[in-house]
Amino acid sequence: MQFCDECGSMMHADDGEMVCSSCGYSVPKDEELSDQYTSTQAQDDSDVIETSEDANFEGKPTADDVKCDECGHTKAWYTIKQTGSADEPPTRFFKCQECGHRWREYN
């Protein structure tokens, strides 16, 4: 990683230059040091957890320890998503298997 000399933010490679993501400061990319840097590929969306209203939860893990506030059913599908910082527990998103009501639970 290379950090900006102006503001200290992380820089990214852009056509032979290292460009600051925050302030736009750029410096020529040092080709002699290029073997010391690791470039990452763009992320795909295969690990995205769908939490929209029309998401198909069927086939997802089932929770037996919950109770739907709408119908009282005790089984729901759920997904887990890290909504806060890494040192906070993840959030579970539920969908009632009986009535389709959705809610979330913070641990």
Image: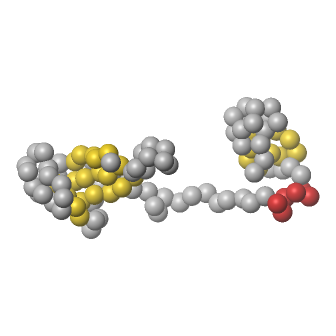
Q: Residue at x 50, y 49 (%)?
A: 86
Seen from the viewer's position, the closer of residues 31 and 64 is 64
Q: Residue at x 28, y 47 (%)?
A: 105
Q: In the rendered view, tell whether residue 27 sits above or below residue 97.
A: above
**Where is residue 54 drawn, in percent x and y?**
27, 51
Residue that lies at the very extreme toward the bottom in this rendered image: 59
Seen from the viewer's position, the closer of residues 89 and 7 is 89
Residue that lies at the very extreme toward the left in this rendered image: 71
Q: Quadrant of residue 61?
A: bottom left
Q: Quadrant of residue 19?
A: top right
Q: Residue at x 44, y 46 (%)?
A: 88
Q: Quadrant of residue 62?
A: bottom left
Q: How is the image coloured?
A: secondary structure
Does residue 72 appear in the picture of this structure?
Answer: yes
With 66 as the anchor, is 27 left or right in this view?
right
Q: Residue at x 28, y 46 (%)?
A: 104
**Where is residue 1 drawn, in percent x and y?**
75, 51
Numbered circles on residues, count: 0
Q: In the rendered view, tell whether residue 88 sits above or below residue 32.
A: above
Does residue 52 appear in the picture of this structure?
Answer: no
Seen from the viewer's position, the closer of residues 92 and 95 is 92
With 40 as the anchor, is 3 left or right in this view?
right
**Where is residue 5 drawn, in percent x and y?**
82, 36
**Where is residue 22 drawn, in percent x and y?**
69, 34
